[in-house]
Image (cartoon, grey):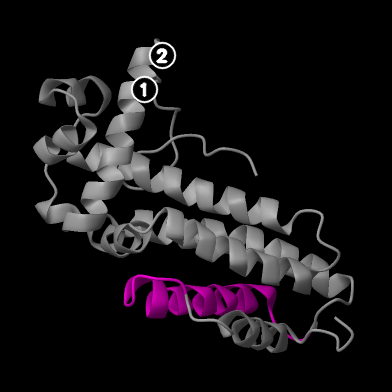
């Protein structure tokens, strides 16, 4: 999966944001984005402040404006970065798997590992709907776009049932992973209990109409 080509506040892709010319500048911008992930995830968009982001990053507040115009700008760039990273790790998880069902099961494991590493993502995703609805929609449409293609390929190969529209199936499977994640990773703050994966994988396999031998 290739990197996103750029962003603006409405979630529409534009030119690539200018990257700092020096290693120090790049490290500072990285620290600001990492801090923003923590602060937005903990405090939410409205309560999050630039001063708290810079304090968490350990940089002077004036340095923020070297890299970002305002709070919205860093939120949008962070959102696109997390969205791209999630799609990238899911694509890698599916690569070289023997069939779609196996890829789906492995993808579920990787998805929950990603949430453990980026626990703020659920709050950031939820709040994006109110910060910029088009940004929120862009994330799910991009995720579903690649999903739909791989499901159609699996249908054509006879790995899963071909009687369900792949776009409908894509959103249904995304919903399963999303809400299982909310149930444990958000509400409980920890991975699902032992045995959860077999249940979820079974539901996913049945939803796809997987062949019995898989």
Look at the numbered discs 2 and 1 and tell me whether their residues touch, using CB distance below 8 Å. Answer: yes
Q: Is residue 201 left or right of residue 127?
A: right
Residue under the image location 35 percent in, 63 percent down: 122
Q: Secondary structure at mark 2?
A: helix
- State the image coordinates of residue 212 (x, y, percent, origin top left): 86, 89
Is 31 a magenta residue? no
What residue is rendered at 32% in x and 26% in y?
A: 29
The residue identified by callout 2 is 23
Q: Nearer the viewer, residue 9 or 79?
A: 79
Query: In the image, what residue occupies the spot 66% across and 81% down?
Result: 201
Q: Is residue 12 visible?
A: no
The CA span between labels 2 and 1 is 6 Å
Q: Is residue 66 above or below residue 50?
A: above
Residue position marked by numbered label 1 in the rendering: 27
Disc 2: CA contacts within 10 A as few (<14), some (14-19) or many (>=20): few
Quadrant of the image occupied by residue 121 = bottom left
* Residue span colored magenta: 163-191
* Residue in view at x 33 percent, y 57 percent: 120
In the rendered view of the protein, which quadrant contains the C terminus? bottom right
Q: Nearer the viewer, residue 28 or 91?
A: 28
Q: Judging from the image, what secondary structure is the residue with disc 1 in?
A: helix
Quarter containing the N terminus: top right
Is any atom of residue 201 visible in this view? Answer: yes
Image position, residue 158 (x, y; %): 89, 77
Residue lying furthest front in this view? 194
The part of the image, by quadrant, that contains residue 26 is top left
**Front in this rendered view, residue 19 or 111:** 111
Magenta segment, prevailing SS (helix, strand or loop):
helix
């Amino acid at each position: 999966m290739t990197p996103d080509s750029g962003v603006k506040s409405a979630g529409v892709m534009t030119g690539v944001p200018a990257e700092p010319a020096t290693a120090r500048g790049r490290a500072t911008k990285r620290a600001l984005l990492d801090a923003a992930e923590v602060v937005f995830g903990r405090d939410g968009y409205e309560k999050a402040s630039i001063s708290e982001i810079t304090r968490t990053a350990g940089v002077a507040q004036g340095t923020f404006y070297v890299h970002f115009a305002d709070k919205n700008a860093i939120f949008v760039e962070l959102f696109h970065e997390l969205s791209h990273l999630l799609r990238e790790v899911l694509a890698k998880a599916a690569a070289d798997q023997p069939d779609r069902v196996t890829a789906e099961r492995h993808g579920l494991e990787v998805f929950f590992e990603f949430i453990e590493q980026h626990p703020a993502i659920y709050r950031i995703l939820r709040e994006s709907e109110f910060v910029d609805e088009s940004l929120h929609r862009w994330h799910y449409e991009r995720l579903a776009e690649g999903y739909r293609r791989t499901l159609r390929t699996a249908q054509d190969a006879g790995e899963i049932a071909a009687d369900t529209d792949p776009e409908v199936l894509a959103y249904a499977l995304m919903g399963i992973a999303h809400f299982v994640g909310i149930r444990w990773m958000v509400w409980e703050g920890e991975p699902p209990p032992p045995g959860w994966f077999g249940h979820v994988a079974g539901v996913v396999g049945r939803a796809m109409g997987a062949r019995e031998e898989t």
